[in-house]
């Protein structure tokens, strides 16, 4: 059954509540003045949790390699650690994401700390890894900041990599999509800061296999202050050939369409897909499945508990997934994958036709960053909801 997104927030909230109530053992302990409770990660039926064998930060992008293995890329440390101390690490799964073994360092540079990787394997078998190189966060009242956008390529399934190239210099912390269009263009969507805290979204397009890149004009939705504007856009190619950009923003996602392969974008408009009310909403993951459907993973807006802790007020406590048969016009009833104090920044991958993986970041109730986790589930699980 497909339904408009205007109904989804109520359905997600109801689903999340029933999941928690069904697991009495998941109730948090009474709050202590000395130590906040650690709420459990509550996983819904139909979703299987898989833990990675390493501590992971600001990552989770996945790709299927030519030999059938899955590679996930995560950060080895937080980007706010001393420069050069963080790296991007690839982990490999031989069984569709159920177990993870071999590890390989992919990016480490003394000049910056890499974060938020995005992955693409083209139809010709070339791997692309996009990430930001964090140097300095914005300082209040100044324009001092640096987090450039970098790209690397591999022609041998990630064994060796070409030298990194900088695609954008400035302050970006938000690339959420890279696709290969039907006509062979490479398209990256990202956001970057234009003043103190405000972001615009844009795309980078290559028509020659990544040799050269053209940047689109920015999509500027205004705003002022921390995490405002147009943030962390996802992208998908629609059946009619247009590109659909789904832009993170508080209250609802916004959208824009391109008819020239991402070189320019039409006027951005709000969608009915709800997002959290705090910290500029939260980003989504958007992919095309072998069935032809679109799959979307995101943090829908849910009711904030009374007297919320700071992380609860941000509203990223529920991670949901839905499918669309008609390129985003209507969606299946959203399936709650899991709930936690904060579970956010999803990455979707179709490991094999109808079998999906979803990685996401997880924070403990005390605000301490913890591991990236992976969930295995099927397309049929979503269709049965």
Image: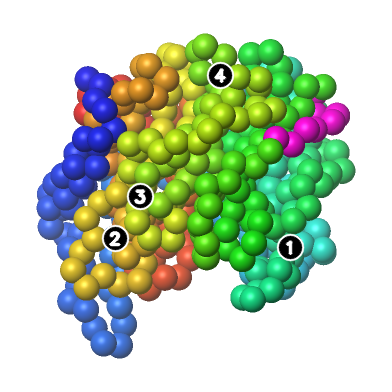
Examine the image and state in which quarter residue 77 appears.
bottom right
Q: Position of residue 212 (x, y in %)?
A: 84, 31
- Label whose residue precedes the other's in the sequence (4 or 2): 2
Give the CA distance from mark 3 to mark 2: 26 Å
- Alpha-carbon span between mark 4 and mark 2: 41 Å
Which of disc 4 and disc 1 is earlier in sequence?
1
Which numbered disc, 3 or 1, marks the residue that appears first in the sequence?
A: 1
Q: Can residue 158 be seen here?
A: no
- Say which residue label 4 marks: 242
Distance from disc 3 to disc 1, alpha carbons, whole Å, reads 28 Å
From what the image shows, is residue 41 above or below residue 78?
above
The residue indicated by pointer 1 is 146
Give the residues drawn in magenta, as a range. 209-216
Residue 106, percent from left and from top = 74, 47
State the CA–CA distance, disc 1 to disc 2: 36 Å
Q: Nearer the viewer, residue 293 or 359?
A: 293
Q: Is residue 317 visible?
A: yes
Give the mark nearer the N terminus: 4 vs 3: 4
The kind of secondary structure the magenta stretch mainly shows is: loop
Which part of the image, by quadrant, shows the N terminus? top left
């Amino acid at each position: 059954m497909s339904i408009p997104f205007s109904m989804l927030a109520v359905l997600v909230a109801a689903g999340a509540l029933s999941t928690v109530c069904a697991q009495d053992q998941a109730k948090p302990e009474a709050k202590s003045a000395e130590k906040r409770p650690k709420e459990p990660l509550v996983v819904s039926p139909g979703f299987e949790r898989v833990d990675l064998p390493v501590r992971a930060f600001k990552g989770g992008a996945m790709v299927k390699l030519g030999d059938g293995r899955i590679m996930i890329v995560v950060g080895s440390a937080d980007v706010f650690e001393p420069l050069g101390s963080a790296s991007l690490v690839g982990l490999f799964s031989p069984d569709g994401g159920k177990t993870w073994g071999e590890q390989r360092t992919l990016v480490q540079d003394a000049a910056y700390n890499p974060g938020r990787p995005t992955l693409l394997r083209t139809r010709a078998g070339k791997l692309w890894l996009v990430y930001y190189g964090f140097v300095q966060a914005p300082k209040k009242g100044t324009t001092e900041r640096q987090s450039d956008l970098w790209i690397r390529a591999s022609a041998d399934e990630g064994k060796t990599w070409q030298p990194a190239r900088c695609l954008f210099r400035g302050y970006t912390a938000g690339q959420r999509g890279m696709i290969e269009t039907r006509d062979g263009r490479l398209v990256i969507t990202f956001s970057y800061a234009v003043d103190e805290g405000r972001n615009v979204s844009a795309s980078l397009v290559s028509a020659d296999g990544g040799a050269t890149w053209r940047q689109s004009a920015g999509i500027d939705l205004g705003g002022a202050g921390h995490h405002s504007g147009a943030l962390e856009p996802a992208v998908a190619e629609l059946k009619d050939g247009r590109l659909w950009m789904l832009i993170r923003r508080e209250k609802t996602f916004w959208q824009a369409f391109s008819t020239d392969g991402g070189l320019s974008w039409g006027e951005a408009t709000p969608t009915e897909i709800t997002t959290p009310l705090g910290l500029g909403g939260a980003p989504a993951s958007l992919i095309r499945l072998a069935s032809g459907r679109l799959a979307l993973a995101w943090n829908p807006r849910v009711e904030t508990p009374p007297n919320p802790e700071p992380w609860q007020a941000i509203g990223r406590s529920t991670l949901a997934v839905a499918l669309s048969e008609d390129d985003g016009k209507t969606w299946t009833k959203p399936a709650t994958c899991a709930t936690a104090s904060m579970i956010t920044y999803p990455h979707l991958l179709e490991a094999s036709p109808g079998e999906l993986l979803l990685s996401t970041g997880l924070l403990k109730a005390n605000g301490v960053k913890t591991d990236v986790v992976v969930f295995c589930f099927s397309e049929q699980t979503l269709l049965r909801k």
